[in-house]
Image: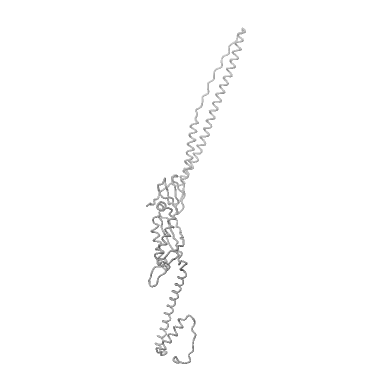
Amino acid sequence: MSQEREIRVASGWGMMAVNLLLLIGGVAVFIGGLVMAEGGGRRGYAYQERRFQVERDYQERLEAHMRAWEAAAKAKASGLTVEEPAPPPRPATPAMPPDRTPLFIAGALCGLATAVLGFVFLFGHFTLQPNEARVLILFGAYKGTVRTSGFFWTNPLMSKKRISLRSRNLNGDTLKVNDKRGNPIEIGAVVVWRVQDTAQALFDVDHYEEYVRIQSESAVRHLASEYPYDPGEGEGAEVTLRSNVDEVSAALAKELQARLQKAGVVVEEARLTHLAYAPEIAGAMLRRQQAEAVIAARQKIVHGAVSMVEMALKELSEKQLVQLDEERKAAMVGNLLVVLCGEAEAQPVINTGTLYH
């Protein structure tokens, strides 16, 4: 099982200055090296031009000397006394300047490499907002997790997986399942969860968000099969889905936490959002609930009526307002129960005789 460990990384602002310096400086050195290399080539071309010019001047002076020498030879043949012209001195070859073009090209290549390095280093920057984390992986090896918000820099060869640490809502679909008694019901739940261990969420399960969704659905199905929808007759204080919402929600949250702990997820809250009988039995169950409600109401009405009749007879006996035999008491009780328990208003009947006639 993977375990998260925090890692310290460099501040992004300081490294941004270094990267920009490398990038801009490398570009400047590259361009300067190319310019200097081109200048060195031009100087070599100028040197060759100067050397050819000196050689042409010397050849011209030598041709002039040959013509003067031929003229002097002809004059001597004619009997004239002339001085032979002196040959022109050969000029010294101008010194060739050192060729630094390879050095300039090497400098340009170094500048290019520095600029490329600065550009690659720019990919090592990343930002983190509050309640976010970055998992750093280098060539398949887990290096650590950054949780502090801000602007940072790390090795650009590291892959930086972003994981949100904020609370999330999972509003599950409405599921059709059977409760503890086998009655088909529809049930749905909402789960509030967040990632606690980024290493477990990323490495111990495949697609932790999908894992949370599937396990939540499975937990809701299992929960529905553990409890009945409504309490049955004569079963006492039984925990049910409809009556004990807090207990059922707590049980759901506990089961979800046990299932999702492998993925490094914490369940903050789990609540049922939808609970109803399936359509095929909803009508029958509604009639059953209505009948139970009517019976409960009747029981309360009868209980109240009997209490009122008992109180009336007791007060009449204590105050001795009238003396009633058992038959008259029975008639009085019947009349009072009809008035108190009847759904329609009682119609008075005037008796002009006695109870017996």
Residue 197 horizontal side relative to residue 345, left or right: left
Choose between 270 and 232: the one closer to the eye: 232
Residue 100 horizontal side relative to residue 247, left or right: right
Choose between 7 and 15: the one closer to the eye: 7
In the figure, 100 relative to 146: above or below?
A: above
Question: Where does the image place residue 220, in percent across and percent down from the top left?
Answer: 42, 62
Question: Where does the image place residue 106, in percent across and percent down from the top left?
Answer: 48, 34
In the figure, 325 relative to 205: above or below?
A: below
Choose between 113 and 153: the one closer to the eye: 113
- Give the quarter of the image for residue 317: bottom left
- Farthest residue to the top: give it: 79
- Farthest residue to the right: give it: 78
- Give the quarter of the image for residue 265: bottom left
In the figure, 67 relative to 9: above or below?
A: above
Question: Where does the image place residue 78, in percent across and percent down from the top left?
Answer: 62, 8
Question: Where does the image place residue 273, in percent across and percent down from the top left?
Answer: 46, 64
Choose between 168 and 230: the one closer to the eye: 230
Q: Which colour scheme is used?
A: one colour
Report the quarter where the C terminus lies.
bottom left
Q: In this figure, what is the number of numbered marks? A: 0
